[in-house]
Image: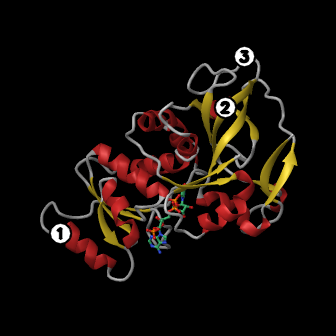
């Protein structure tokens, strides 16, 4: 048995319940992980708020880091090998806010020793999303890119991945997060009234000075924006294909995951409230 968080009905943090459940022994192609940190993403709570009633209770959490507890027969993890006691991260999983979880080995990767569990558990959902936004928008080295919501998890990953490409990045954030944008290589401007004027003033409107690509990490409801999501087939395939490359970047220190705060797993409701505030100030992790 283990304890994990579920939404037994649709709603916000108030509906979450910490319940006992069986952890199935891993079959062929599966791995059981003792979770050391569960990552938190806005998507966790979006999927507890609405959906198909047949999916209730909804297990919460899409990514974890931990230690291999057991492997199915003839099973290797996605990064190769794998043995009991190995430190790993897993994405995309179903029900990561858990003490133990059995998941497909194809979603389990060796954790670089340089990454802490809280960082590793929060790397891949945001980083694969950022990589996908770069793919879809075709942002490249010579571009000036506007990133809206640049101090959030996806925004910070975008700043770093765009910097590696050599792009110039202008990033919006609230004033208290100006330093975060600058620390990750962006030029900060405040969002809110007058944004367009500030963008024009900073980007310039002469030859070669313009915004080539605009990436929205906030969810602005605007006609004409192509939206990307992990449920789209092309996005899912691309995101799965770049996981190892992003883990390698993080392991080498080229993709930092700023963790704002950790909570005991049992306090997931309080953590979810902070997550849903829209201003968590960095990634949050749940520690069993
Ligand atoms: N479609 C997908 O595949 C996908 C994948 C991942 C995430 N998402 C979505 O992308 C969004 C960001 O995710 P995240 O993990 O980066 O979240 P996050 O870490 O919570 O960051 C949210 C950011 O939004 C900024 N923000 C909040 N209100 C704003 C406003 N009115 N105007 C401008 N910026 C505002 C905040 O900036 P300040 O704190 O500086 O105010 C904060 O940095 C969420 O809606 C999430 O659900 C979608």
Return the residue found at the far top. 74
Q: Under 8 Å from ligand 1: the CB of mark 1?
A: no
Q: Residues within 10 Å of mark 2 (few under 14, many from 20)?
A: many
| Mark 3 and mark 1: Cα distance apart in space | 59 Å
| Label located before the other in sequence (3 or 1) | 3
Asked if residue 137 can be seen in this view, the reply is: no
Query: From this viewpoint, which residue is outermost toward the bottom?
Result: 193
> Left or right: 246 with respect to 240?
left
Residue 65 versus residue 70 in the image, above or below: below
Is residue 198 something one can see in this rendering? yes
- Ranked by sequence position, the earlier of labels 2 and 3 is 2
Decide which of 286, 151 is in the foreground and name it.
286
Q: Residue 124 vs residue 92: left or right?
A: left
Q: What kind of element bears circle 2?
A: strand
Q: Badge 2 is on which residue? A: 67
Q: Position of residue 247 (x, y in %)?
A: 48, 36
Kindly report the distance in space between the C-alpha atoms of the residues bearing marks 2 and 3. Answer: 18 Å
Which of 65/263 is in front?
263
Secondary element type, mark 1: loop
Residue 84, x across and y down, in percent: 70, 22
Contact (CB < 8 A) between labels 2 and 1? no
Residue 169 position by quadrant: bottom left
Mark 1, Cα crowd under 10 Å, few <14 / some 14-19 / many 20+, is few
The image position of residue 268, as x and y in percent, is 70, 58
Which quadrant of the figure contains the N terminus?
Answer: top right
Q: Please, is residue 183 above or below residue 166 in the view? A: below
Q: Which disc number belongs to residue 204? A: 1
Q: How is the image coloured?
A: secondary structure
Q: Is residue 287 above or below residue 186?
A: above
Residue at numbered disc 3: 74
Element under disc 3: loop
Neighbours of disc 3 within 10 Å: few (<14), some (14-19), many (20+):
few
């Amino acid at each position: 048995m283990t304890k994990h968080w579920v939404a037994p009905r649709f709603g916000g943090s108030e509906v979450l319940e910490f319940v006992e459940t069986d952890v199935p022994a891993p079959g062929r192609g599966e791995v059981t992980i003792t979770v050391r940190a569960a990552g938190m993403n806005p998507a966790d709570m979006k999927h507890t708020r609405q959906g198909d009633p047949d999916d209730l209770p909804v297990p919460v959490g899409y990514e974890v880091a931990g230690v291999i507890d057991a492997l199915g027969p003839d099973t290797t993890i996605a990064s190769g090998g794998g043995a009991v006691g190995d430190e790993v991260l897993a994405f995309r999983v179903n029900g990561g806010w858990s003490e133990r979880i059995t998941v497909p080995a194809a979603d389990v990767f060796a954790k670089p020793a340089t990454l802490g569990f809280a960082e590793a558990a929060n790397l891949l959902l945001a980083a694969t999303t950022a990589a996908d936004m770069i793919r879809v928008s075709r942002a490249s080295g010579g571009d000036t890119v506007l990133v809206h919501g640049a101090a959030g998890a996806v925004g910070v990953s975008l700043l770093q991945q765009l910097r590696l490409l050599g792009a110039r990045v202008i990033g919006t954030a609230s004033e208290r997060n100006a330093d975060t944008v600058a620390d990750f290589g962006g030029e900060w401007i405040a969002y809110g009234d007058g944004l367009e004027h500030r963008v024009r003033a900073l980007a310039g409107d002469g030859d070669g000075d313009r915004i080539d690509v605009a990436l929205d990490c906030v969810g602005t409801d605007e006609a004409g924006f192509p939206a990307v999501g992990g449920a789209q087939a092309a996005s899912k395939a691309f995101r799965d294909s770049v996981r190892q490359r992003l883990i390698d970047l993080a392991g080498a220190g080229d993709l930092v995951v700023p963790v704002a705060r950790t909570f005991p797993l049992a306090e997931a409701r309080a953590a979810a409230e902070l997550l849903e505030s829209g201003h968590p100030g960095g990634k949050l992790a749940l520690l069993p």
